[in-house]
Image (cartoon, helix red, strand yellow):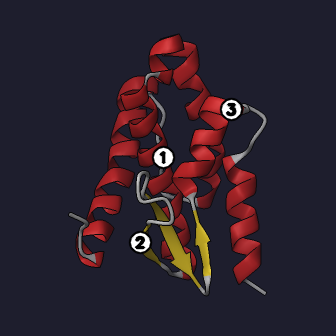
Amino acid sequence: MLMTSAELTDLMIDSAQNAVTTTEDEFNLTLDGTEKSIDQVDDVILSWLGRYKDQALEENAVFTICNIYGAYVGEIFRNKVGGNWAYDESDPDAPYVVLNYAGNTYAFAGICYQRLVNDSQISVRSYYDQALANNIQ
C-alpha cells in the first residue's frame, strides 16, 4: 500500500533528518541543510565505503544510505524551489521515490545510488546543480 502525499512528504523530511543525525554519529560531520552541505553528501556517501567496505554495499545498507541522503538533498531542493514527493511506479516491481517539480522528476536517491554503487565520479552536487538550473532562469 502506497502512502498519501502528506505521509510521503513526512517520511522524506524524517529521512532527511536521519541523514543529518547519522552523519553526525558516524562521521562527526554536520549537515546543516544548506546547499553548500551537498558537497559533504558527495564525500559522506563514499565515506560509507571507506568505513564499512562491502557491508556498505549490502542491499539494506545501500537502500538506507541512498534514501536518507536522497531525501536530504531533495529537501534542500524542495525548500529552495518547491516540488512534491511522489512514487514512480513505471516499474511496478521496483517503485521508487522522486521529487516532482515543474513537469520534471528528480531521483535524488537514484543519483546517490549511482555514486555509491556504480561510479564514484558521479556527483550528487552536479545533479543538484543541474536540477536547479533547469528550474531557475
Q: What type is the residue that disc 1 sits on?
A: Tyr
Disc nearest the viewer among 1 and 2? 2
In this picture, is 116 found above or below 17?
above
Percent across and percent down for residue 61 are: 40, 28
- Residue 120, which numbered label? none
Residue closer to the observer: 59 or 71: 59
Percent across and percent down for residue 86 are: 41, 71
In this picture, is 40 found above or below 1?
above
Q: Residues within 10 Å of mark 1 (few under 14, many from 20)?
A: many
Q: What type is the residue that disc 2 sits on?
A: Ala
Label 1, label 3: how many angstroms apart (C-alpha)? 16 Å
Give the residue at x 39% y 44%. Answer: 20
Give SS at disc 1.
Answer: helix
- For the image, the number of numbered tags is 3
Give SS at disc 3.
Answer: helix
In this picture, is 127 found above or below 27?
below
Give the residue at x 51% y 81%. Answer: 82
Determine whether label 1 and label 2 are within 8 Å by CB.
no
Marked residue nearer the N-terminal end (2 or 3): 2
The residue identified by callout 1 is 69
The residue identified by callout 2 is 86
Percent across and percent down for residue 111 are: 63, 49
Give SS at disc 2.
Answer: strand
